[in-house]
Image (cartoon, coloured by chain):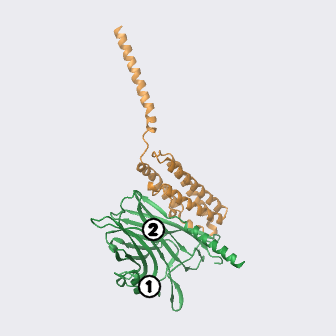
Chain colours: A green, B orange
Amino acid sequence: MKRRLNLALALVGLLAVAVVGQAAAERSQKGNVQVSLNGGFSPRKLPRNEKAPVVVRLSGGVRTADAAPLPRVNRLKLELGWRGRMNTRGLPVCPAARLRGLASGQALAACGPSQVGLGNLNAKIFLPGQLPFDVKANLLAFNGRTKVGRRAVLLHAYTSDPPVSFLIPFVVRRSDGLFKTTLVTTIRRAVGTWPHVARFRIEVGRTFRREGEEQSYLNASCPVPQGFTAAPFSFARATYTFAGGDEQSTESVRGCRVRKGT
Amino acid sequence: MRRNLGSRAGLGAGIATIILSFLALAAGPAMGTMAEPPSRSEYVEALEQMCKPRAQATQRAMDGVRQDVRKPKRISIAARKFDKAASIFGGTIERISKVSQPTGDASKLNKWFTYLERQEAYLEEIATQLHKRKTIKAQRLTARFIHNGNLSNNVVLSFGFDYCSFKFSRYG
């Protein structure tokens, strides 16, 4: 009986995952260029008032509606609207210099304790006098700092064919308004002008110990008013700035549910 | 006689001129409505001009609604904000539906307008449920409102609308 119940619960769980997984990416188009953003966080059930550990997933991309060559993304701004908190106290900082020129395994060996996420990146490389070709890079996210000491998420990208690694530093800023946390990177400065980013997927979140207590890198609550059990909110917004200065953004709306008894 | 004929001919020519002028005047507006349908970019431009002030008005009308729903005493204020947003939304649909559409886009736009009408209905229903203080129903309708908004955006994605597209951040 217990086994059947477990199986039933597992099936319900799978169904729930399937339903959440079906949340389609939000897209927008200007001219022939489409940009997209998808993502979410887990768990979706969170305390109403207190913050709990979460893992955030973000994926997005650029494509052209008419199969024209991809425009180059010079700058990417990811804004998070969730009522979350990034907790880096007690988490080791990985200096950017330590990651340069390393393969994924070596980067992990060098800065493993600072790792906060992972993912992948697809890009098209446009080299002068050659046909464009695709590359797929593994991404590792590390807790870092900018040269002026600001908090940063350092994205280490490594592609084995051709064997190239590069670093994309996202500066973390707090801002007013609907989107409280902003991560900005100038891709052109980080990787040069040849790669044209097609799509990315990243999952960020980890736990670590500080003074014997378990901490989480990302924490969030579901601060819905009394009388409500769930609420939608502007989860994230991605703004792509293309070579030439054109900007295009898309916004993703997700919902959280209040954990029972909170 | 010749003079008579001549004067009759002159009179005939005068009448013909008047009739032709009248026909031309009468035909004017008719020809205007039968003018070539706009291109997609002209259509988008025309609609965006209508949507922009209304999207901004919606944003102003919905300002602070998230804070309002937090306090039971202010739920009715939140409901009135949704009423206002629904009214602005309905007015926008009425105006943009009168704009002649580009050829070849009729089925897409019909589908879009169906979604837009559903959006308006959801806004009205959310307001009604909030007036009744049925917060859970309002919450469920909000989820449908957002889903429907995303579907409506996808239908006209290739049009590249900005102010005429659904953006949740405009609703408070």
- Judge the density around disc 2: few (<14), some (14-19), many (≥20) Cα neighbours within 10 Å: many
Residue at x-position 62% and y-position 65%: B139
Q: Position of residue B172 (x, y in %)?
A: 53, 64
B155 lies left or right of A136: right
Q: Residue furthest right?
A: A1
Q: Which label sits on residue B85? A: none
Residue A89 or residue B54, whichever sits in front: A89
B146 lies left or right of A184: right
Q: Which label sits on residue A60? A: 2
- Judge the density around disc 1: few (<14), some (14-19), many (≥20) Cα neighbours within 10 Å: many
Task: Name the image quarter holding the N terminus of chain B.
Answer: top left
Which of the two labelled residues, at mark 2 and mark 1, occupies the earlier sequence position? 2
Examine the rendered structure and indicate whether residue A115 appears above or below residue A59.
Answer: below
Res B67 visible: no
Q: Position of residue B86 (x, y in %)?
A: 57, 56
Q: Residue furthest top?
A: B1
Examine the rendered structure and indicate whether residue A251 appears above or below residue A1.
Answer: above
Q: Position of residue A112 (x, y in %)?
A: 44, 85
Give residue B130's quadrant in the image: bottom right
Alpha carbon separation for disc pair 2 and 1 = 24 Å
Q: Amino acid at mark 1?
A: Ser
Residue A28 or residue B12, whichever sits in front: A28
Q: Secondary structure at mark 2?
A: strand
Q: Position of residue A5 (x, y in %)?
A: 69, 76
- Circles 2 and 1, Cβ within 8 Å, touching? The answer is no
